[in-house]
């Protein structure tokens, strides 16, 4: 599902809301999650999962095309851990 499909589904299930308002709501939710993660905060949606940021140390990598060693800088990467309810639904429980 892509963002526009999510917006359309929410709008269809809430006919009393305008499409533009639903779009603003969905975009605001995503922006708040992104902003919280950019600050290094953890975002937990009960039953769905938790978004967090993990740090990766600098390391020596390898260019797969040439085999040459390259230095890879330390960086932060997003991490998602599924919630129990989501895991159970995916596994048919």
Image (cartoon, helix red, strand yellow):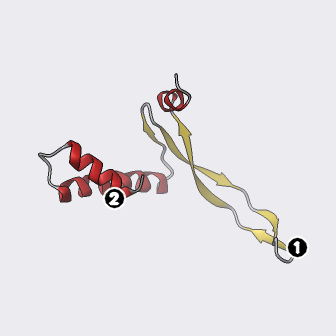
Q: CA distance from mark 2 to mark 1?
A: 42 Å
Mark 2 or mark 1: name the one nearer the start of the chain.
2
Residues tagged 2 and 1 counted as in contact (Cβ below 8 A): no
Q: Secondary structure at mark 1?
A: loop
Q: Secondary structure at mark 2?
A: helix
Q: Residue furthest top?
A: 93
Horizontal arrangement in the rendering, residue 71 relative to residue 56 (left or right)? right
Q: Which residue is mark 2?
A: 4
Q: Position of residue 45 (x, y in %)?
A: 42, 37
Tell me the residue at 74%/62% (across/down): 58
**Which is nearer the eye, 87 or 52?**
87
Where is 46 relative to 41, above or below? above
For discs 2 and 1, the disc positioned in front in the rendered view: 2
Q: Position of residue 31 (x, y in %)?
A: 36, 57
Neighbour tally class for label 1: few under 14, some 14-19, many 20 plus, Cα within 10 Å? few
Tell me the residue at 27%/53% (across/down): 8
Q: Position of residue 12 (x, y in %)?
A: 22, 47
Where is 73 relative to 30, above or below? below
**Which is nearer the eye, 50 or 74?**
50
Tell me the residue at 48%/52% (across/down): 37
Q: Which residue is mark 1?
A: 67
Quarter of the view holding residue 18: bottom left
Quarter of the view holding residue 5: bottom left
Horizontal arrangement in the rendering, residue 78 relative to residue 31 (left or right)? right
Which label belongs to residue 53? Answer: none
């Amino acid at each position: 599902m892509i963002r526009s499909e999510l917006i359309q589904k929410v709008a269809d299930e809430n006919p009393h809301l305008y499409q533009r308002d639903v779009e603003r709501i969905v975009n605001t939710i995503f922006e708040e999650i992104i902003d919280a993660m950019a600050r290094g905060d953890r975002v937990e949606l009960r039953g769905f999962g938790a978004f967090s940021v993990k740090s990766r140390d600098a390391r020596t990598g390898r260019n797969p095309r040439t085999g040459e060693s390259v230095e890879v800088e330390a960086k932060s990467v997003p991490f998602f851990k599924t919630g129990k309810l989501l895991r159970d639904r995916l596994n048919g429980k």
